[in-house]
Amino acid sequence: MLVNMNDVLYPAKKDKYAVGLFNAVNLELARGIIAAAESSQSPVIMGTAEVLLPYGPLEEVSYYLIPMAKKANVPVVIHLDHGLKKETCLKALELGFSSIMYDCSTDSYEDNVKKVKEMADIAHSYGATIEGELGHVGDNPDSAEGSSHINPADFYTDPKMAKDFVDKTGIDALAIAVGTAHGAYKLPPKLDFERIRTIANTVDVPLVLHGGSGLTDNDFKRAIQEGISKINIFTDINVAAVEAEFCKFENMNKGIIDLIPAAVEAVKQATLKKMMLFSSNGKGCLNQPSKDELVKAVVQEVLREMGRR
């Protein structure tokens, strides 16, 4: 079923597990992701990012992402990750994406707040959720996300600013910079777990960890324990699909239809591994909030709105 981020991240936040975002720029990736979610009964967030649109245009990927989400027997969020332009975010909402990220993290703090708040109001009018980023998650060399080779520590998220940012923008989830980077790591990253814990205790919304591919299992487990509720993965499943196709391509007598099943299965297994690691398996049928949780969520949203006026 098609849901938004609040439907899957608040239960994750409450019960200390994480829901993975897996980008699907083609049908093979999407089929593998959905197969993993359904076989493990895990909620899942599936989508694409603005920097990935050259490989799968937004409108075209919407033709399979949204119907697959609606048909799935587990909660599926269709999310635009790292929307860099207002027009891209608006198009995603118009196409039926249930969630977006408007990434203004390289702007000044004031502009980040202003632009994200405006987009949050628009997203909520569609019944969609929105993620913002404070601090900046950079990119490893050869990352599909870009090439902003920065020292992560220079752009860590400030906990006090995080609360102000959440209160002023009305976002539903906050991406934080705590030592990760997009793409494959040349050296093991060092996560600031204390910073994760401090921010989690400071803001009410679920926290997001970008640049998840390549972290150790212990890194993931501790990050979740300290307060991460959403983890973004792309490099791992992207590489798994290619490796499977190379192994299958033994000679030139092979065609594309010989490679597709191998890619789908490899993506399924790589995704399934992450779902088990994040402990989201078995949570796909448990994401309907109780009446008390619904009331609490409504009260918190009203108080946040009153605080911004």
Image: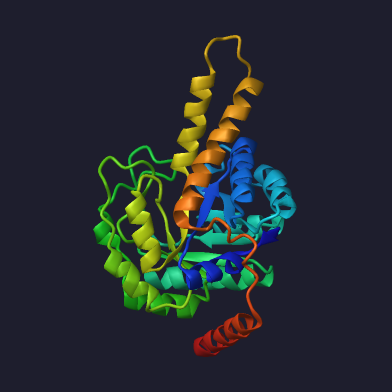
Which residue is more in the foreground, 295 or 133?
Answer: 295
* Relative to 20, residue 228 above or below: below
Q: Is residue 107 visible?
A: no
* Left or right placement of residue 118 versus residue 165 in this view: right
Which residue is more in the foreground, 92 or 71?
Answer: 71
Figure label count: 0
Which residue is more in the foreground, 29 or 244?
Answer: 244
Image x and y of residue 153, in percent: 25, 59
* Relative to 308, residue 236 above or below: above
Colouring of the image: rainbow
* Left or right placement of residue 265 versus residue 135 in this view: right
State the residue at coordinates (62%, 47%). 39
Residue 44: quadrant of the picture: bottom right
Quadrant placement of the N terminus: bottom right
Q: Is residue 140 visible?
A: yes
Image x and y of residue 85, in percent: 53, 56
Image x and y of residue 112, in percent: 44, 68
* Relative to 166, residue 102 above or below: above
Image x and y of residue 40, in percent: 59, 50
